[in-house]
Amino acid sequence: MIQEIRITTVEELIPLLSDQEYRPTLKRNRSNYVYRGMPNVDYRMTTTLRRNCKGLERVLEPAILKNFAKYAVIEDPTVASSVWRQMILGQHHGLPTRLLDWTHSALVALHFATSEDNLEAMEAHDGVIWRIDIDEVHALLPEKYRAIMRANKAEVFSVDMLTQASADLNSYDEDMGGHAMVVLEPPSINQRIVNQYAFFSVVPLGMADLEEFLERDTQNTVKYVIDRRLRWRVRDMLDALNMSERSVYPGLDGLSRWIARHYFVKNEE
Protein backbone atom coordinates (compact mmCIF):
# COMPACT_ATOMS: atom_id res chain seq x y z
CA MET A 1 0.00 0.00 0.00
CA ILE A 2 1.22 3.50 -0.83
CA GLN A 3 0.16 6.27 1.53
CA GLU A 4 0.08 9.71 -0.10
CA ILE A 5 0.76 12.78 2.04
CA ARG A 6 0.48 16.26 0.58
CA ILE A 7 2.88 18.92 1.90
CA THR A 8 1.63 22.51 1.66
CA THR A 9 3.55 24.20 4.51
CA VAL A 10 7.13 24.04 5.81
CA GLU A 11 5.80 22.86 9.18
CA GLU A 12 4.32 19.76 7.53
CA LEU A 13 7.85 18.67 6.57
CA ILE A 14 8.85 18.07 10.19
CA PRO A 15 7.53 14.47 10.44
CA LEU A 16 9.38 13.61 7.22
CA LEU A 17 12.65 15.10 8.46
CA SER A 18 12.47 13.61 11.97
CA ASP A 19 11.10 10.14 11.21
CA GLN A 20 13.42 7.93 13.28
CA GLU A 21 12.36 4.95 15.33
CA TYR A 22 13.78 4.48 18.81
CA ARG A 23 15.56 1.13 19.12
CA PRO A 24 15.80 -0.09 22.71
CA THR A 25 18.62 -2.53 21.91
CA LEU A 26 20.80 0.34 20.68
CA LYS A 27 19.36 3.05 22.94
CA ARG A 28 19.48 5.25 19.86
CA ASN A 29 17.09 6.60 17.24
CA ARG A 30 17.70 4.95 13.89
CA SER A 31 15.80 5.04 10.62
CA ASN A 32 15.20 2.11 8.29
CA TYR A 33 13.94 4.36 5.52
CA VAL A 34 15.47 5.49 2.26
CA TYR A 35 14.09 8.31 0.14
CA ARG A 36 13.92 9.26 -3.52
CA GLY A 37 13.22 12.87 -4.47
CA MET A 38 12.03 13.83 -7.94
CA PRO A 39 11.16 17.29 -9.28
CA ASN A 40 7.88 16.28 -10.92
CA VAL A 41 5.15 14.25 -9.23
CA ASP A 42 4.15 12.86 -12.62
CA TYR A 43 7.52 11.15 -13.14
CA ARG A 44 7.41 7.37 -12.77
CA MET A 45 10.07 5.42 -10.87
CA THR A 46 11.71 3.82 -13.90
CA THR A 47 15.33 2.77 -14.31
CA THR A 48 17.53 4.36 -16.94
CA LEU A 49 18.03 0.88 -18.43
CA ARG A 50 14.30 0.51 -19.04
CA ARG A 51 13.94 4.02 -20.45
CA ASN A 52 16.94 3.51 -22.72
CA CYS A 53 16.28 -0.02 -23.98
CA LYS A 54 12.47 0.05 -24.20
CA GLY A 55 11.69 -3.61 -23.52
CA LEU A 56 14.98 -5.04 -24.79
CA GLU A 57 16.75 -4.82 -21.42
CA ARG A 58 17.33 -8.56 -21.13
CA VAL A 59 19.12 -8.64 -24.47
CA LEU A 60 21.03 -5.35 -24.26
CA GLU A 61 22.01 -5.11 -20.58
CA PRO A 62 24.84 -7.72 -20.73
CA ALA A 63 26.35 -5.97 -23.76
CA ILE A 64 26.12 -2.55 -22.08
CA LEU A 65 27.95 -3.77 -18.97
CA LYS A 66 30.50 -5.83 -20.91
CA ASN A 67 31.51 -2.89 -23.05
CA PHE A 68 31.55 -0.51 -20.11
CA ALA A 69 33.88 -2.82 -18.18
CA LYS A 70 36.13 -3.28 -21.22
CA TYR A 71 36.71 0.44 -21.67
CA ALA A 72 36.41 1.62 -18.06
CA VAL A 73 39.09 -0.70 -16.68
CA ILE A 74 41.73 1.95 -17.36
CA GLU A 75 39.95 4.24 -14.87
CA ASP A 76 39.12 1.57 -12.30
CA PRO A 77 40.87 -1.83 -12.52
CA THR A 78 38.36 -3.38 -10.07
CA VAL A 79 35.44 -2.81 -12.42
CA ALA A 80 35.93 -6.19 -14.10
CA SER A 81 35.62 -8.08 -10.82
CA SER A 82 31.86 -7.77 -10.38
CA VAL A 83 28.81 -6.97 -12.46
CA TRP A 84 27.49 -5.01 -9.49
CA ARG A 85 30.59 -2.81 -9.39
CA GLN A 86 30.15 -2.17 -13.10
CA MET A 87 26.59 -1.01 -12.48
CA ILE A 88 27.52 1.29 -9.59
CA LEU A 89 30.41 2.96 -11.40
CA GLY A 90 28.40 3.17 -14.61
CA GLN A 91 25.35 4.63 -12.85
CA HIS A 92 27.52 7.39 -11.45
CA HIS A 93 28.70 8.33 -14.93
CA GLY A 94 25.37 8.11 -16.77
CA LEU A 95 25.40 4.51 -17.98
CA PRO A 96 21.90 3.01 -18.38
CA THR A 97 21.50 0.52 -15.51
CA ARG A 98 18.82 -1.29 -13.52
CA LEU A 99 19.83 0.63 -10.40
CA LEU A 100 17.46 3.22 -8.95
CA ASP A 101 18.94 6.00 -6.81
CA TRP A 102 17.85 6.46 -3.17
CA THR A 103 19.28 8.34 -0.22
CA HIS A 104 19.28 7.73 3.51
CA SER A 105 18.86 11.48 4.01
CA ALA A 106 15.43 13.07 3.79
CA LEU A 107 17.17 16.44 3.28
CA VAL A 108 18.99 15.17 0.19
CA ALA A 109 15.70 13.82 -1.18
CA LEU A 110 14.08 17.19 -0.48
CA HIS A 111 16.86 18.86 -2.46
CA PHE A 112 16.08 16.75 -5.53
CA ALA A 113 12.34 17.30 -5.11
CA THR A 114 12.87 21.08 -5.18
CA SER A 115 15.43 21.25 -7.99
CA GLU A 116 14.90 21.79 -11.71
CA ASP A 117 17.17 21.90 -14.74
CA ASN A 118 14.74 24.54 -15.99
CA LEU A 119 14.10 26.84 -13.02
CA GLU A 120 11.13 28.39 -14.83
CA ALA A 121 9.30 25.12 -14.07
CA MET A 122 9.68 25.32 -10.28
CA GLU A 123 6.06 26.44 -9.84
CA ALA A 124 4.69 24.56 -12.83
CA HIS A 125 4.22 21.22 -11.07
CA ASP A 126 4.45 19.52 -7.68
CA GLY A 127 7.59 17.74 -6.52
CA VAL A 128 7.62 14.32 -4.87
CA ILE A 129 9.56 12.29 -2.32
CA TRP A 130 9.15 8.52 -2.10
CA ARG A 131 9.96 6.73 1.16
CA ILE A 132 10.42 2.98 1.45
CA ASP A 133 11.17 0.80 4.48
CA ILE A 134 14.35 -1.24 3.88
CA ASP A 135 13.41 -3.87 6.48
CA GLU A 136 9.99 -4.34 4.90
CA VAL A 137 11.43 -4.66 1.40
CA HIS A 138 14.14 -7.09 2.51
CA ALA A 139 11.63 -9.25 4.38
CA LEU A 140 10.36 -10.25 0.93
CA LEU A 141 13.76 -11.58 -0.19
CA PRO A 142 14.44 -15.30 -0.69
CA GLU A 143 15.86 -17.06 2.36
CA LYS A 144 19.43 -17.30 1.07
CA TYR A 145 19.61 -13.50 0.81
CA ARG A 146 18.18 -13.00 4.29
CA ALA A 147 20.62 -15.61 5.66
CA ILE A 148 23.54 -13.62 4.26
CA MET A 149 22.20 -10.48 5.92
CA ARG A 150 21.90 -12.28 9.26
CA ALA A 151 25.41 -13.70 8.96
CA ASN A 152 26.79 -10.23 8.34
CA LYS A 153 24.57 -8.59 10.98
CA ALA A 154 23.55 -6.17 8.26
CA GLU A 155 20.34 -4.43 7.24
CA VAL A 156 21.45 -3.48 3.72
CA PHE A 157 23.58 -5.29 1.17
CA SER A 158 27.16 -4.47 0.25
CA VAL A 159 28.61 -5.37 -3.15
CA ASP A 160 30.42 -8.34 -1.60
CA MET A 161 27.24 -9.61 0.07
CA LEU A 162 25.24 -9.33 -3.15
CA THR A 163 28.00 -11.10 -5.08
CA GLN A 164 27.85 -13.89 -2.52
CA ALA A 165 24.11 -14.22 -3.00
CA SER A 166 24.11 -13.85 -6.77
CA ALA A 167 27.14 -13.37 -8.97
CA ASP A 168 25.27 -12.85 -12.24
CA LEU A 169 22.20 -11.09 -13.58
CA ASN A 170 20.22 -14.16 -14.63
CA SER A 171 20.34 -15.81 -11.21
CA TYR A 172 19.37 -12.54 -9.54
CA ASP A 173 16.35 -12.14 -11.82
CA GLU A 174 15.31 -15.74 -11.25
CA ASP A 175 15.58 -15.31 -7.47
CA MET A 176 13.64 -12.03 -7.37
CA GLY A 177 10.97 -12.52 -10.02
CA GLY A 178 8.71 -9.50 -9.74
CA HIS A 179 8.17 -9.73 -5.99
CA ALA A 180 11.43 -8.67 -4.30
CA MET A 181 14.52 -6.50 -4.73
CA VAL A 182 17.77 -5.78 -2.92
CA VAL A 183 18.62 -2.40 -1.42
CA LEU A 184 22.36 -1.88 -1.81
CA GLU A 185 24.77 0.52 -0.11
CA PRO A 186 27.50 1.29 -2.64
CA PRO A 187 31.19 1.59 -1.78
CA SER A 188 32.39 5.18 -1.36
CA ILE A 189 34.05 5.40 -4.76
CA ASN A 190 33.73 9.18 -4.87
CA GLN A 191 32.70 12.16 -2.75
CA ARG A 192 29.32 12.51 -4.48
CA ILE A 193 28.17 9.11 -3.22
CA VAL A 194 29.29 10.05 0.30
CA ASN A 195 27.63 13.47 0.28
CA GLN A 196 24.38 12.18 -1.16
CA TYR A 197 24.23 9.35 1.43
CA ALA A 198 23.51 7.17 -1.60
CA PHE A 199 21.75 3.82 -1.75
CA PHE A 200 20.49 1.86 -4.75
CA SER A 201 17.66 -0.55 -5.29
CA VAL A 202 18.57 -3.31 -7.73
CA VAL A 203 15.38 -3.63 -9.77
CA PRO A 204 14.92 -7.10 -11.30
CA LEU A 205 13.84 -7.24 -14.91
CA GLY A 206 10.77 -9.21 -13.86
CA MET A 207 9.50 -6.19 -11.91
CA ALA A 208 7.71 -4.37 -14.71
CA ASP A 209 6.32 -1.62 -12.48
CA LEU A 210 8.07 -0.68 -9.23
CA GLU A 211 5.18 1.45 -8.00
CA GLU A 212 2.77 -1.42 -8.57
CA PHE A 213 5.09 -3.66 -6.51
CA LEU A 214 5.16 -1.12 -3.67
CA GLU A 215 1.38 -0.75 -3.73
CA ARG A 216 0.81 -4.51 -3.74
CA ASP A 217 3.53 -5.85 -1.46
CA THR A 218 4.43 -3.13 1.07
CA GLN A 219 2.60 -1.36 3.87
CA ASN A 220 5.04 1.39 4.90
CA THR A 221 5.67 3.13 1.59
CA VAL A 222 4.88 6.85 1.61
CA LYS A 223 4.60 9.28 -1.29
CA TYR A 224 5.11 12.87 -0.13
CA VAL A 225 3.78 15.38 -2.66
CA ILE A 226 5.43 18.82 -2.33
CA ASP A 227 3.02 21.55 -3.43
CA ARG A 228 4.45 23.54 -6.32
CA ARG A 229 3.74 26.83 -4.53
CA LEU A 230 5.99 25.71 -1.66
CA ARG A 231 9.01 24.63 -3.69
CA TRP A 232 10.86 27.97 -3.80
CA ARG A 233 10.22 28.45 -0.07
CA VAL A 234 11.66 25.01 0.72
CA ARG A 235 14.53 25.69 -1.66
CA ASP A 236 15.50 28.79 0.32
CA MET A 237 15.24 26.85 3.58
CA LEU A 238 17.56 24.12 2.25
CA ASP A 239 20.16 26.72 1.27
CA ALA A 240 20.14 28.01 4.85
CA LEU A 241 20.72 24.43 6.03
CA ASN A 242 23.73 24.06 3.69
CA MET A 243 21.88 21.57 1.51
CA SER A 244 22.47 22.72 -2.05
CA GLU A 245 24.14 21.82 -5.33
CA ARG A 246 27.50 22.66 -3.71
CA SER A 247 27.16 19.80 -1.23
CA VAL A 248 25.23 17.33 -3.38
CA TYR A 249 27.58 17.70 -6.38
CA PRO A 250 31.05 18.43 -4.95
CA GLY A 251 33.32 20.29 -7.36
CA LEU A 252 32.96 23.01 -9.95
CA ASP A 253 29.84 21.53 -11.57
CA GLY A 254 27.86 21.79 -8.35
CA LEU A 255 29.32 25.21 -7.57
CA SER A 256 28.29 26.52 -10.99
CA ARG A 257 24.76 25.12 -10.69
CA TRP A 258 24.39 26.66 -7.23
CA ILE A 259 25.54 30.09 -8.41
CA ALA A 260 23.24 29.93 -11.46
CA ARG A 261 20.23 29.24 -9.24
CA HIS A 262 21.31 31.84 -6.67
CA TYR A 263 21.22 34.55 -9.33
CA PHE A 264 18.18 33.23 -11.22
CA VAL A 265 15.65 35.99 -11.92
CA LYS A 266 12.05 34.84 -11.61
CA ASN A 267 9.53 35.76 -14.25
CA GLU A 268 7.23 38.32 -12.62
CA GLU A 269 4.22 36.90 -14.47
Image (cartoon, rainbow, N blue to C red):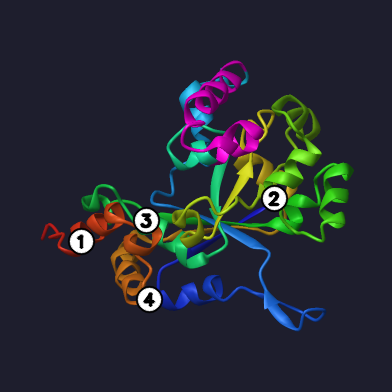
Depth check: give the residue in front, 186 or 263. Answer: 186
The magenta-colored residue range is 59-88
Counting from the top left corner in percent of width and height, residue 122 is at 28, 55
Between the C-alphas of marks 3 and 2, the distance is: 23 Å
State which mark lies toward you, 1 or 2. 2
Residue type, numbered disc 1: Ile
Residue type, numbered disc 2: Ser
Q: Is residue 268 rendered to the left or right of residue 67?
A: left
Tell whether label 1 touches label 4 (CB within 8 Å): no
Give the residue at mark 3.
249
Residue 71 versus residue 156 in the image, above or below: above
Please report whichever mark, 4 or 3, sits nearer to the chain's N-terminal start: 4
Counting from the top left corner in percent of width and height, residue 134 is at 70, 56
Tell whether label 3 touches label 4 (CB within 8 Å): no
Residue type, numbered disc 3: Tyr
Counting from the top left corner in percent of width and height, residue 84 is at 64, 37
